[in-house]
Each structure stands twice: as structure tokens, then as C-alpha cells.
Amino acid sequence: MDFASSFFAVAEKVGLLFILIAIGFICQKIKLLTEEANKCMSDIVMYIVTPCVIINAFSATLYTREEIFDVLKNIGLTALIAVACHVAMILAVYLIFRTSDEDRRRVMRFGAVFSNAGFIALPLAQALIDTPESHEGSLYAAVYLAVFNIALWTWGLVNMSGEKKSINARKIILNPGIIGVVAGLIIFTSPLYVNFGEVSGIRLPGVIQDAISAVSALNLPLPMLMVGFYLAKADLLAAFRDGLSFICMAVRLVVFPMVLFAVLRILGVDGNVLIVSVIGASAPVGATTTIFSAKFGRDTELSVRLVSLSTIISMITMPLIVGLTQMVA
């Protein structure tokens, strides 16, 4: 696949996401979508939809025992890449963002590290890679998201709160993303150690699998409506006047994903693992930046501007970067 074909293939999928974002934008402007409704959708996506997406990725496709070992190897590689990526990004933001304004500094560091992995990267991986016969895009994106959530509820929490005692082991262990990955891995690897007559492994009843798949389908529209809601409330003109915001977005949207792409290519990583890793790293500033900023009294207006403007700019940067990745993968 040449670059033009890859670019337009990714642009088409990103364009779909932005149509849904536009619907959320309009719904906020006409007061059809309220702050309370948006919060409810956020909880539904976090606590119900995301675990279903992860479990569906592990359970919807049947693999042979040999294929399971290959996929497990890629799962381990994706997890290793995600860990190394987040550690490197955390170290880098301490060098890049050193402004004396503590609230701005903490928001900038958080926004540069944490992409919209759950609300944009995961749906894009689903749309770009998944087929009726295979859910590898969701599978590897779910693993990336699990590592993302661990980083979010450890360093991310400490960074925004300013206190190490804010780390809650229970929240980390019982995070919906972690629970989904553990449950999915049990189902996925069950053919290796469970046999019921002629059937190997744990198989979910058809009606339950169909229900999980139906709920998983909500992971595309609901998060995009939420992003559109925040976009409609943002003061984008103020964002254009803030030079430090552009540095944060440049780091988030271009520098980190391109460095990751270059390093992974040098190390010989290719295929869907490479694509999913770059998608996760190239997504815009995560909506969690605003959620955490509001919770701990940081610069919430700055966080909203970063999330909104980076989401708009990512409509150009993601097709370019992910299209290049897909071409060489």
C-alpha cells in the first residue's frame, strides 16, 4: 500500500470520528446534550463499554492453539512498548515543561503524556484493523489501554494532585480496563488448559457474546459525542494565543509518535503491533486531562483548550503519521 492510499484510508476513518464529534458539538450548542448527560455517558463508557470492548476483542475470534501463542507474543510486545513509551514520555515532559506556574506546568505535563487512547485511539484501531474474522486491532489497543490506565492512576494522579498518597492500589487493580483485560485473557487462553470433550476452552453463550458485541459497538459513537461536547465549550481563540499550548500539542501529536515510530522501525517491529502502538501515541490530548484538572483544581480552561484544539489538529496529523505507519507495517 502506497502512502496516498494509506493516508486516505486513515483519513476516512478519522473523518468518521469527526462526523460523530460534530454531532456532539451540535447537540451541546442546541442544549440537547448537557453536562450531566455527558458525565453519565463518560461513566457508561468507562465502566461498561470499555470492559465489553476488551472482552469482545479477546472472545469474539476463535484461534488455534498455535495462533494463540503468536497473539500472546504480540500482546506481550505491545504491553512492553506501551510501558517503555509512557516511561519515556514522563521523563521527557519534566525536561520540556518547566514553567513557574505550577497549575499550568502540571496540566501541560499530563496532557503531553496521556493521549485520548480510550476515546479515540481504541475506536480508530477497531475501525482501521478489525475485521469480522479478526479483532487484533481491539486486542492490542486494549493492552495498550491497560498500561495507559496504570500510568494514569499512578504518575498521572500524583502529577495532578501533587501528593503521592493519592495513589490508590484498589483503584488501579479494580480499574475497568484492567478487569476487562484479565477477564479477556482468561477466556482467550482457556483452550491451552481447559477441555470439555471436543470443545477446547471457555466459550461464552451466543446471546451473551452478542450482547457484549452490541455494547462494544457503542465505543465508537459515545466517546465522540463527548469530545464534541467539550469542543463546543472551548475557547479556541485563547488556545491560538497561547504559545506553550502549541508546544504541548506538538509534543503530543508529532514528536512522541514520530520518535516511537522511528525507534520501533529500527528495532524491527512491524504489523498490527506497530500500527496500534503508533495510533495510541499519536492520539490527541486525552479528555482525562480536563477531568483530573477539574478534580484537583488545576488550570481547567487550559486543559479544555488542549483537548479541543489538539483534537481538531489531529484530524491532519493522525492520517499523516498513521498512514505512514500503515504503509511500512
Image: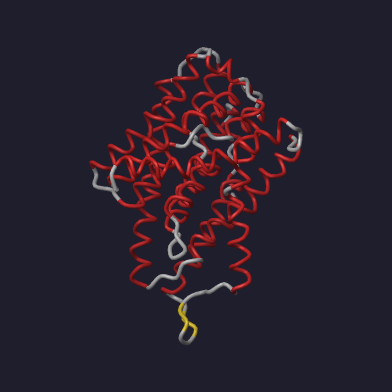
Q: Residue at x 55, y 51 (%)?
A: 177
Q: Say whether residue 97 is left or right of residue 179.
A: left
Task: Please provide percent x and percent y for residue 35.
Answer: 74, 34
Camera-side residue of 14 and 165: 14
How is this picture coloured?
secondary structure
**Residue sitting at the far bottom:** 197
Left or right, residue 125 beside residue 172: left
Q: Is residue 102 above or below residue 77?
A: above
Return the x and y of residue 108 as percentages of the image width and height.
51, 23
- Residue found at x 46% / y 52%: 143
Asked which quadrant contains residue 322, the reply is: top left
Residue at screen point 63% across, 48% down:
45
Q: Percent position (x, y) of residue 151? A: 49, 40
Q: Provide residue 69's location: percent of width, then percent of height.
A: 35, 66
Using the image as rendered, state which of residue 189 and residue 45 is in the foreground. 45
How many discs mark residues in the rendered view?
A: 0
Location of residue 180 by image quarter: bottom right
